[in-house]
Image (cartoon, rainbow, N blue to C red):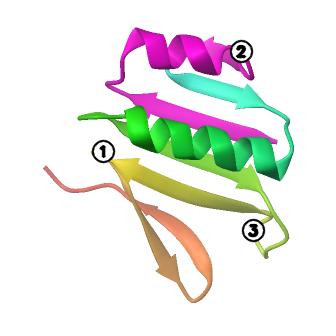
Amino acid sequence: MVVMVLERVTPSLRGELTRWMLEPKAGVFVGDMSALVRERLWEHICKQVRDGGAMLIHSTDTEQSFALRLHGDTTRSVVDYDGLQLIRIPAN
């Protein structure tokens, strides 16, 4: 399972992702694909995100059974805490 969350990106980038994934809510994409396709899509997103932000969540063989990656200007950050990935929400 792969989940991508895009913030403040162009409609054309969102449209490109709908070729591979479903968009159940604006900017949230869900799909099931090979690791190669996932990595190529992520590389493409990272090149096209401009002033926006992107988050990739995918299943993997870890204690949590998933991994998180962020790129660009997102409203959250990932913190590694003894091998666990946690989300940090900045205080206003």
| Residue visible at 82% across and 42% down in the picture | 1
> What's the magenta region?
1-25
Q: Position of residue 62 (x, y in %)?
A: 79, 74
Q: Earlier in the sequence, mark 1 or mark 3?
A: 3
In the rendering, which numbered label is found on residue 75?
1
**For mark 3, does the 10 Å Cα neighbourhood hold few (<14), some (14 to 19), or many (20 or more) residues?**
few
Name the mark nearer the viewer: 3 or 2: 2
Type of the residue with mark 1:
Thr
Residue 65 falls in which quadrant of the image?
A: bottom right
Q: Position of residue 82 (x, y in %)?
A: 57, 89
**For mark 2, does the 10 Å Cα neighbourhood hold few (<14), some (14 to 19), or many (20 or more) residues?**
few
The reply to whether the C-beta atoms of the residues labelled 3 and 2 are less than 8 Å apart is no
Residue 38 lies within the magenta run? no
Relative to 79, say whether 65 is above or below.
Answer: above
Assign a secondary structure to mark 3. loop
Type of the residue with mark 2:
Arg
Relative placement, left or right, of 48 versus 32 is left
Assign a secondary structure to mark 2. loop
Residue 91 falls in which quadrant of the image?
A: bottom left
Q: Earlier in the sequence, mark 1 or mark 2?
A: 2
Q: Which residue is mark 2?
A: 19
In the rendering, which numbered label is found on residue 64?
3
